Amino acid sequence: MAAKKKCPDCPPPAPVWMTTFSDLNTLLMTFFVLLVIMANFDPVKYALTVESLQNAFGIMESFPTVPITPVVNIPKKTGDERVKKQSLKDAEKIKEIVESKNLEDAVKVEVTEKGIAIMLRDPVGFASGSADLRDQGKNILGDISEVIKGNPDLKVRVEGHTDDVPISSSRYHSNWELSSARSLSVVQLLSGQTGIHPQNMSAVGYGEFRPIVPNTSPENRSKNRRIQIFVDYIN
């Protein structure tokens, strides 16, 4: 009688750490799958990446053709770094001029997203009820023109503002008219001294309707009587 064959011994079980390691890998895979699902892909870049990988591995969805990778113009970040640096340099030069003339209280210079903002107010600006610049105002604008001239593509916008005291003049019937005339006076001066293209310059009058502080005192009214010049280096 033939002897019964003995069943082979069962292989030894996997180490205990293997179970924990497998669970960890599963959790990690699930985590990264969720990240991919929630990611916000750029469809164009994604399509180009897939196509590039397909070409590299020889994966073809249809009959072989000559692979053509489309040229995609990726928008640049807002602003030209070189132009921004130039606007910063010019703003610093204008600040130095203002400080040298001790006009820090009357002329304010700030850097904006697009260029420079310059504010002129008493006693540099205009005489009461007049759109004729004082000599001090003409001089400082002449100095500013020296800094920004030579770049005809700059865009200049001048805004005129007044306080809320009604004007009594045969020449100007409202603060709107007065503020518009003042801003136009500044534009004409800058246009003649900077060489900036006239089509890039504009003048606006807001009258008393955009105060920076309430018109509740002579000091506040003095602050609201101002000319604001925006020099944009970036379109």
Image (spheres, rainbow, N blue to C red):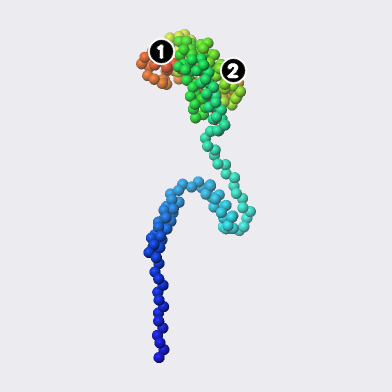
Residue at x 53% of width, y 11% of height: 135
Q: Which residue is denoted by mark 1 in the rendering?
A: 166
Q: Earlier in the sequence, mark 1 or mark 2?
A: 1
Q: Which of the numbered marks, if any, corresponds to residue 193? A: 2
220 versus 18 height, above or below = above
Q: Secondary structure at mark 2?
A: helix
How many C-alpha atoms fall within 10 Å of the one at disc 2: few (<14), some, or many (≥20)?
A: some
Left or right relative to 28: residue 186: right
The one nearer the camera, 28 or 37, is 28
The one nearer the camera, 178 or 114, is 114
Q: Can residue 205 be seen at all in this image of the molecule?
A: no
How many C-alpha atoms fall within 10 Å of the one at disc 1: few (<14), some, or many (≥20)?
A: few
| Structural distance between the alpha carbons of marks 1 and 2 | 33 Å
Residue at x 48% of width, y 13% of height: 124
The quarter in which the N terminus is drawn is bottom left
Q: Quadrant of residue 154?
A: top right
Q: What is the x, y in percent for residue 11? A: 41, 72
Left or right relative to 156: residue 18: left
Disc 1 or disc 2, which is closer to the eye? 2
Left or right relative to 7: residue 88: right
